[in-house]
Image: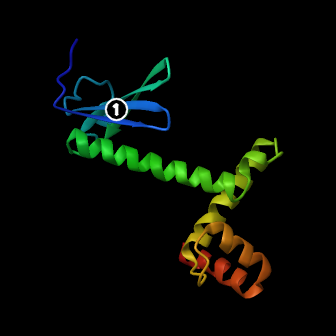
Amino acid sequence: MQRRVEKKHVTQENGHGRSERRQVRVTRDIRWIEGISARKNATSIVEVERTRTTGEKTSIERAYYISSLAVDAETMGARIRSHWGIENSLHWVLDVTFGEDRSRVRDRNSAANLTALRKLSASLLKRTPAGRARSIAQKRKIAGWNPDFAFDVLARICEV
């Protein structure tokens, strides 16, 4: 059965040797979804279709979201993209600054605990002004050299 798509937005980006097309479709016709009434704020269903072409290879990926927002497809696409930008930048910081991908820890609980500590550290370092130091890597280095700065970083826990 075809559902009514109320809003649709398409973007196209080219760069880094690839072409990516994103199509965002939004519908507020959600009554047909079994159990949706249990989600008291659900107002719309979103489908994001990403078509990526690199050289001769093309891949298509679809993601679905249940949302409480009653916004158009363009706004929804921008919000979803923004969320993943934040996620990707956090993973980049964890990998580059804290060397998370080089970690040899294999025990699931230990790995989860270390990831939580790295995320907390990154968050605290972001919140701490350090004069000329702009990056988290610079602040991390200063905290290793200067006990007063390290204390200032740790004092931010009370603000979190």
| Side of 107 where 30 appears, left or right | left
Q: Nearer the viewer, residue 16 or 28?
A: 16
Expressed as whole percent of the image width and height from the top left, the position of residue 9 reads 23, 35
Residue at point 47%, 21% (across, down): 59
- Check disc 1 and report the residue beneath it: 22
Q: Nearer the viewer, residue 122 or 27?
A: 122
| Side of 76 where 84 appears, left or right | right
Q: For the residue labelled by badge 1, is the local secondary structure a helix, a strand or a loop?
A: strand
Expressed as whole percent of the image width and height from the top left, the position of residue 84 reads 46, 46
Residue furthest to the top in view is: 1
| Side of 115 where 45 appears, left or right | left
Expressed as whole percent of the image width and height from the top left, the position of residue 38 reads 33, 36
Residue at point 67%, 67% (across, down): 137
Q: Can you say whether 76 is above or below 118 in the image?
A: above
Q: Can you say whether 19 is above or below 122 in the image?
A: above
Name which residue type carries label 1: Arg
Residue at point 67%, 77% (across, down): 154
Around disc 1, counting alpha carbons within 10 Å, would you say few (fewer than 14), some (14 to 19), or many (20 or more)?
A: some
